[in-house]
Amino acid sequence: MAAIDSERQAAIDDRLQAGLLEWYGVQGRDLPWRRTSDPYAVLVSEVMLQQTQVSRVVPRFEAWLERWPTADDLAAAPAAEVLAEWSGLGYNSRALRLHATAKAVAEQGWPDDEAGLRALPGIGPYTAAAVTAFALRRPAAAVDTNQQRVLDRWDGAAGRTAVEVRRRALEFVPVDAPDAWNHALMDLGATICTARTARCDACPVASDCASAGLVDPAAERALRRASRQAVPFESTPRFVRGRIVAALVEHGEIALPALAAALPAGITAERIDGALSGLVRDGLVVRAGDALTLPT
DNA sequence: CTCCAGGTTG
DNA sequence: CAACCTGGAG
């Protein structure tokens, strides 16, 4: 019976939640950005953490906040200094987007929900959820790769889409402690339930985990690779490029408006356009006005 | 030495 | 879906 299964699952979920929160209370890491609910500080930490390990972020985070304690301070700084302070952290464009977000916030204030955060430069689904949970202290699932791996193992369900995992993750988030919950899940993934090994013997929730003692990191890797490459060839740009060239081989010359009709049905205009400009750029197709030909 | 992870963007 | 960058892993 589905009702019994879902009841049983709900009981397991409850124990996972309680067990992990208890573990976090004792074993959780004390990190500088966890001592604040200032959205600016949280955002700075999250952007840095997107690309850099915790131990390296700590000193850079503290230096950053000392130099620019508020979004207004950062907004007023010259871009060159922002980049200089960012140096060594990689992905300079992220520093510039953080700067842009600081300017937006200095003008308009902070958005008060996840969707509003999502609209700011450099803030995607993960970071929007993280700021919502850690600063706004409202329920949100900040599903990074750590969280996704832990949740997949709990459920014994590999290969779920990001949307599926996010929906599942949200089921666990306690309304009264979204921040502790997200931190706890990340800490478990970072210290016990890691990508390369699962130390189930040290895991506080192993008794309710579908994968306890069964985790096979090599198999997980293989599965990820496979699902990543599971994209049908027909949906790749290479396929469209190939069909365009084949059509030109067959017809000799094609007028641009007639191109779509000379290709297999179901290819969007955007894909045709993209493939064509790539072919022209690469010199595989010559375009003179509306006339498309192969190079001579 | 090469390879890869890790969110967001276009 | 590749590109963005860098440190860490193999």
Image (cartoon, coloured by chain):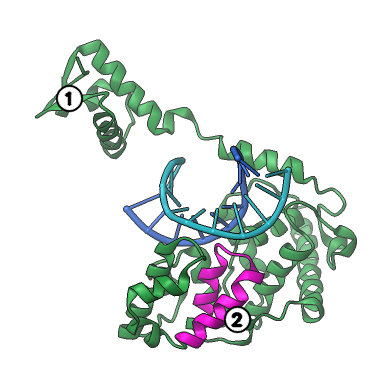
Chain colours: A green, B blue, C cyan
For mark 1, what is the residue?
A258
Q: Secondary structure at mark 2?
A: helix
Camera-side residue of A293 and A19 = A293
Number of other residues with Cα within 10 Å of mark 1, as a class: few under 14, some 14 to 19, many 20 or more = few
Q: Secondary structure at mark 1?
A: helix
Q: Amino acid at mark 2?
A: Trp
Looking at this rendering, what residue extends furthest in the left direction?
A: A289
Disc 1 to disc 2: CB gap under 8 Å: no
Q: Are marks 1 and 2 on the same chain?
A: yes
Residue A166 sits in quarter: bottom right
Residue span colored magenta: A41-67
Residue A223 picture location, percent across and down = 67, 40
Residue A120 picture location, percent across and down = 38, 71
Camera-side residue of A217 and A68 = A68
Check the residue under mark 2 and report the chain it is in.
Answer: A
Check the residue under mark 1 and report the chain it is in.
Answer: A
Camera-side residue of A204 and C1 = C1
In the rendered image, the vertical position of residue A37 relative to residue A145, given as above or below:
below
The tally of labels here is 2
Q: Amino acid at mark 1?
A: Ala
